[in-house]
Image (cartoon, grey):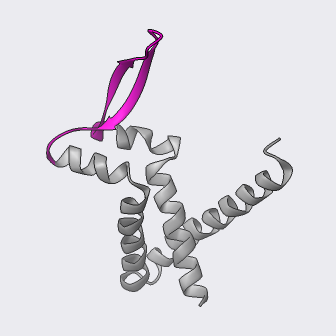
């Protein structure tokens, strides 16, 4: 049960890292493009959308979907766990601890109303 919890937390954190975290923005950039649209009031809004075609478009669509990326991140964590007992488990443990900390921080922020 502990192994499953560690894998759950590590895949959660890896997915968040790939899909949302600023630190990975440069890694995601080649798979997205910026699209400008004017609102009814004439203001310009900028949207970041996956590229339309090819491998970069497919990866962009994957990275824009938390659930899709989560499947691949989970598969990666499970493969590391099974096939790389020492190095892989160390990497997984780091992600799991960070994932647990992120969940605790989310709970704390909700309890105190999001103030620092």
User: Does residue 23 appear to the left or right of 83 in the view shown?
Assistant: right
Q: On screen, 77 above or below 17?
A: below
Q: Is residue 45 magenta?
A: yes
Residue at (32% x, 25% y) in the render: 35
- Which of the 4 image quadrants contains residue 57? top left
Q: On screen, 12 above or below 7?
A: above
Q: Nearer the viewer, residue 39 or 86?
A: 39
Q: Where is residue 15 shown, x and y percent of the image?
A: 46, 59
Residue 14 at least partly seen: yes
Residue 116 at least partly seen: no
Q: Where is residue 93 shown, x and y percent of the image?
A: 57, 73
Q: Nearer the viewer, residue 104 or 90?
A: 104
Q: Where is residue 38 shown, x and y percent of the image?
A: 39, 15
Residue at (38% x, 33% y) in the render: 48
Residue at (75% x, 60% y) in the render: 107
Q: For the view shown, which residue lies furthest in the top direction?
A: 42
Residue at (44% x, 52% y) in the render: 18
Q: For the view shown, which residue lies furthest in the left direction?
A: 54
Q: For the view shown, which residue lies furthest in the right direction?
A: 112
User: Does residue 87 appear to the left or right of 32 in the view shown?
Assistant: right
The quadrant in which the N terminus is found is bottom right
The quadrant in which the C terminus is found is top right
How many numbered discs? 0
User: Does residue 17 appear to the left or right of 27 in the view shown?
Assistant: right
Q: Where is residue 51 shown, x and y percent of the image?
A: 24, 38
Q: For the view shown, which residue lies furthest in the front direction?
A: 40
Q: Which residues are magenta?
A: 30-54
Q: Is residue 2 magenta?
A: no
- Which of the 4 image quadrants contains residue 81? bottom left
């Amino acid at each position: 049960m502990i192994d499953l919890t560690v894998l759950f937390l590590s895949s959660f954190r890896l997915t968040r890292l790939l899909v949302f975290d600023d630190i990975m923005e440069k890694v995601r950039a080649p798979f997205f493009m910026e699209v400008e649209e004017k609102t009814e009031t004439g203001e310009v809004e900028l949207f970041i959308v996956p590229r339309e075609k090819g491998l970069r478009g497919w990866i962009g669509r994957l990275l824009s979907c938390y659930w899709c990326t989560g499947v691949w991140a989970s598969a990666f964590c499970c493969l590391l766990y099974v096939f790389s007992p020492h190095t892989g488990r160390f990497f997984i443990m780091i992600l799991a601890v960070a994932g647990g900390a992120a969940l605790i921080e989310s709970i704390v922020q909700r309890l105190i109303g999001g103030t620092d």
